Image (cartoon, coloured by chain):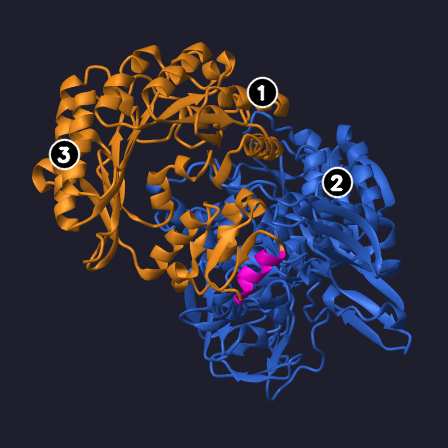
Chain colours: A orange, B blue
Amino acid sequence: MTEAPPVAVYVHWPYCSRICPYCDFNVVRDRGRAAEQAALAAAILVDLETQARRLGPRRLVSVFFGGGTPSLLDPEALGRIVERARTLFPGNGPAEVTLEANPTDAEAARFRAFADAGVQRLSLGVQSLEDSALAFLGRNHSAAEARRAAETARAVFPRLSLDLIYARPEQTARAWRDELAEALALGPEHVSPYQLTIEPGTAFGRAVERGRWRPPDGDLGADLWDVTQAVLEAAGFDAYEVSNHARGDAARSRHNLAIWRGAEYVGVGPGAHGRLDLAAGRLATRAARAIGDYLDRVREAGVGWDEVEALDSSAAAEERLLLGLRIREGVPLAQVKALGLGPDSPRAAVLVEQGLIDIDAERIRTTEAGRLVLDRVLAELIA
Amino acid sequence: MTTPLDRIRNFSIVAHIDHGKSTLSDRLIQTTGGLTAREMTSQVLDNMEIEKERGITIKAQTVRLKYKARDGLEYVLNLMDTPGHVDFAYEVSRSLAACEGSILVVDASQGVEAQTLANVYQAIDNNHEIVPVLNKIDLPAADPERVRQQIEDVIGIDASDAVECSAKSGIGIDEVLEAIVTRLPPPKGDETAPLKAMLVDAWYDAYLGVVVLVRVIDGRLRVGQQVHMMQTGASYRVDKVGVFTPKTVDVESLGPGEVGFITASIKEVAHAAVGDTITDEKKRTSEPLPGFKEVQPVVFCGLFPVDAADFEDLRAAIGRLRLNDASFSYEMESSAALGFGFRCGFLGLLHLEIIQERLSREFDLDLIATAPSVVYKIKLRTGAEIDLHNPVDMPDPMQIEAISEPWIKATILTPDEYLGAVIKLCQDRRGEQKELSYVGSRALVVYELPLNEVVFDFYDRLKSVSKGYASFDYEIIGHRTGDLVKMSILVNAEPVDALSMLVHRGRAETRGRGMVEKMKELIPPHLFQIPIQAAIGGKIIARETVRALRKDVTAKCYGGDASRKRKLLDKQKAGKKRMRQFGKVEIPQEAFIAALKMDED
C-alpha cells in the first residue's frame, strides 16, 4: 500500500491586542471578544474535521498557528486542535507544530503551557532589537522584553525562529549588521528577515499616501539585503528561501517548505487559504474573512469556505512556479509543464543569459541574483 | 422663392473665443423667430459636442433670418457662422467671400484679442463692411469708451457708432439687426447671367448624404438642374434645394445673393471642394470664382492603436471621420515600435487635436500619437524636390542639397508684465521679431517663427509663461531653408522610429537632452541597464541610462499569498498590452506622448 500524500494544516487566529501599522493580514483587536474566541476555537475543530473527511487519507506534515497573534489562544484550545489534526491525519512520524508569538512578558509566561500542548517550534515576532524602531513599528514590547522572551523560548521549545523587519526609514547598513548579530546571539536556529513593505489599506499605507513619511528608496533595501545574506551566511545559515534562513536542513520550516513545494494544505480559521487535491483537480479555498461570517458558515456547512476556485492546469502551474522559484531548490519542470518552460524556451533563455535563473532537463531554479528580482523574473516567465 | 437683392444681407460674425459670438447668433435667431424658445438648445450653431465644449466652430453653419425692419420692409438676413480658428483659415476665407459684411463682436471689458485681429483683417481683405458691436455691455467691468478707442487704434476702423449690446441679457439686439440692414451693403448679382455659385462648405448628413452649402452669385440654382463643378470637373443633378432657418426648409430654387444648401447624390465630402464654382452644365459661366485653393495638410502625425488588435477599428473610424472632413488625409504606416497605424495630415494643431479627440471619444479608441511633424521640402542633389511628411522617410543626408521648412507669422497679444517671457520664448524658438507695439496696456508682438518650433508645445508654453493671459494667432507665410538634421532616439542602442524628428542643428542638443531625460523618467527599470541616446547620424548628442532594477521581490509569500500573487501576475499580463516591446525593452505608451511634451526651462 502506498503512503498517504502529505498535508499541512494552517490555523488562522485573527486576534491581536494591538494592530501593527504595517500589517495587512486578517486581524481584529481581541478586547471584549472572549466568548467569540471560545466559539471560534470550537468552529475551527469542526472545519478541520469536515475538510479532512472530504480529503480522505492524508499524512500530517505540520500544523502552523499563524495570525493575528495565535499566542493569545488558550493553550488548551490549541492542544485540542493539534490533537484533532493528529487524529484526522495520522502520520508515521512527529508532525512539526509551529506557533507564532509576540515577545511580551505575558505571552512568554505561557510558553511552557504551549510546549505541553504540543508546540515544538516557536516563531517569535521580535521585528527589531532597537526600542526606537519598535516604537516606529507600533509594537507592544520593548527590545529587552524581546530578548527575555527569546531566552525563555530557547529554554522551553526545541526550535526557535526569529522574525525581523529591515529597511526601516533611516536605517543604516552598519546598524543592521549589528542588529542581526545581536539577534543571532539569541540563539535561533532559523531567521526570517523581511523587508518592510508598505501595503495599501494599512496605517503605514495611509501615512505614506498622505506624505507623512517616505519609505526608504530601493537602493537601501538592496544594500540591506546584501548585508543580510552576508551576515547570515557567515553565521552558517542557509538562505533556503527569499526571506528564510536556517542553520542546517533540519532547521527549515517544514510547514512552509511543504507549501512552497506544492503540497496540499488545509486552511482553518477566518480568511485562511487552503489547497486541496480532489478528484476534480486542485481547489484553492478561502475561508470567510469576518469572524461572524466564518462562524455562520461553519455552523451551516460544516466548513468555513467562502471562495472555492478550481485551478486549471495553467493557474496551478503558475502557482507552482511563483512559490517554487522562491526556494533555492527550485521547481521540477514536470510540475510547470502547462507553462511550456524548458531549457529551450526563449523566455527562459534570456533570463539564463542574464544570470537570473538556471534551468536543466529536470528543474528550473533562481540564482541568488534572480531571487532578488524574483517578481520581475516571474513577470518575464509568466506575463 | 425670390428675394430682391436689396432685401438681402449676407453677413458673418467675427469674434474672439468667449466674446459671445455664439450667444449673439442664438439671440438673433430667437429674436427673428427662427426657433421658438423651446427649440433653442444652448448655442444652436455649434453642433458638435467638441465644438460646444471648446466654444469653437469647426464647420461653417448658416442660418436664414427673416427680419421686419423699422422701415416697415421685410429683409432676409443670412448669417454665416465661420470657423473661428486659424487652422481653418481657408474655410474662413471662403465663408467671408460669400458675405458682404461682418459684425465685429468685441467683449466690452476684455477688448481686442489676437484672434479678433486675424479674423477682422481677413474680413477687411474680403472688402467687408464692418459693424463693430460691443458685447457684455451690462457687466460691471464693461468699459465701452476704452474698447471703442482700442478698436479705432488697433484695427483702424471707425467705432464711434459701435452698437452696444448684451447678447446674454437681450439688450440691444434690435439695434444690431437694424445696423445689419442699414449699414451693410446688399449683395450684387445678375439673375439672367449663367449660374455662378460658390461651394462654401460641405458635410455629411446621415439622412441627406453630402450636403453642400452654397452662395449664389449670378443666375439661378434649381431642383433638377444639371450642374458642373468647375474645379473638380464633376457634374451632378441637383436633388434638393433648401435653406436653414435653422431648420432645413426645401425651396424650388435660389437666386442671386441667396444662401442655402443643395444635395446632389455626391458620394463623399471629399468630392465637394470648398471654394469650388458651381455652374450650369449646359450654360456655363466663363470664369470660375477667384480664391480657390486645394486644401493642404500642414501638420502630420502617426496615429497607432494602443492595442494592435484595434487596428481595423481604427481604420474604420478614420474612414468614417474622413467622410465628413475632407481636410485631413491619411495613409497606412507601419512602425517598428508601434506596429500598424496611419500617417495623418491636418490643417493645424487644433485640427489634429480635434480628430484625435473624436477618434477616442466617438469611436472609443485608445491611441498613441507620434510627434507632430510639419511638411519639409527637401531638394536632392539630383535636382529633384520631395515633400517630407515623416522623418522616418528622410533620405540619406549625402543625397540632400537643402531642406526647407514652413514658417509662420505669429501675432501675440500679452499683458506688459509677461512681455519679457513671451519674447524669450519666441527667441528660444528661433523667432524673428517683426513688430512690437502697444494696444492700451497690452503689448502686441509679431514674430516670424518656424512652424516646427510651434507644433510641439509652443501654445502650452505661451499660456504658462503668461499665466494664461497671452493670446496667439498665426498664419503660414511659406518655406525657408534651414540647417535641419534628423535626430534619432536610441533605446538600448536601437533607434525608435516613432521618436525620430527633424530639428534645427542649433536646437538639437537641447531637444535631444530633453527627450532622453524624459524617456529616462518614463521607462521603468528593467532587469538590465538601458542606455537612452539622442543621435544625429552616428554622433551621440545626449545620453541617459535607466539603471538596472536592483531589488524587486515580495518579502512574504506563504500559502495565503499565492492567490494574490497570481492575480497580480494576471494583471501584469493585461498591463503588458499597454506597453510596446522594443527589442528587449518595454516602453509604456505614455512615454511616446509625454516625451514630446517637454518643459524646457
The chain to which mark 1 is attached is A
Work out how far the residue at label 1 is from the one at label 2, CA to CA, in angstroms. 47 Å
Q: Is B232 part of what is drawn in magenta?
A: no
Q: Are marks 1 and 3 on the same chain?
A: yes
Name the foreground residue: B199 vs A91.
Answer: A91
Mark 1 and mark 3 lie on one chain; the one further toward the N terminus is 3
A349 part of magenta stretch: yes
Q: Mark 1 and mark 3: span between their CA atoms?
A: 44 Å
Q: Are marks 3 and 2 in contact (CB under 8 Å)?
A: no
- The amino acid pointed to by label 3 is Leu
Can you tell which of label 1 and label 2 is closer to the viewer? 1
- Front-most of residues B456 and A175: A175
Tag count in the figure? 3
Identity of the residue drawn at 40% across and 40% down: B557
Residue underneath mark 1: A178
Q: Chain of mark 3?
A: A
| Residue B568 on image: x %, y % | 42, 47
Residue occupying the point 48% across, 46% down: A328
Q: Give the class, few, some or many, for how many residues have Cα within 10 Å of label 3's Cα (few <14, many ≥20).
A: many
For the record, the magenta segment spans: A344-353
Which of the numbered marks, if any, corresponds to residue B194?
Answer: none
* Location of mark 3 (residue): A45
Q: Going 43% across and 11% down the picture, which residue do you hit?
A: A142
Which chain is disc 2 placed on?
B
Q: Which residue is mark 2?
A: B600
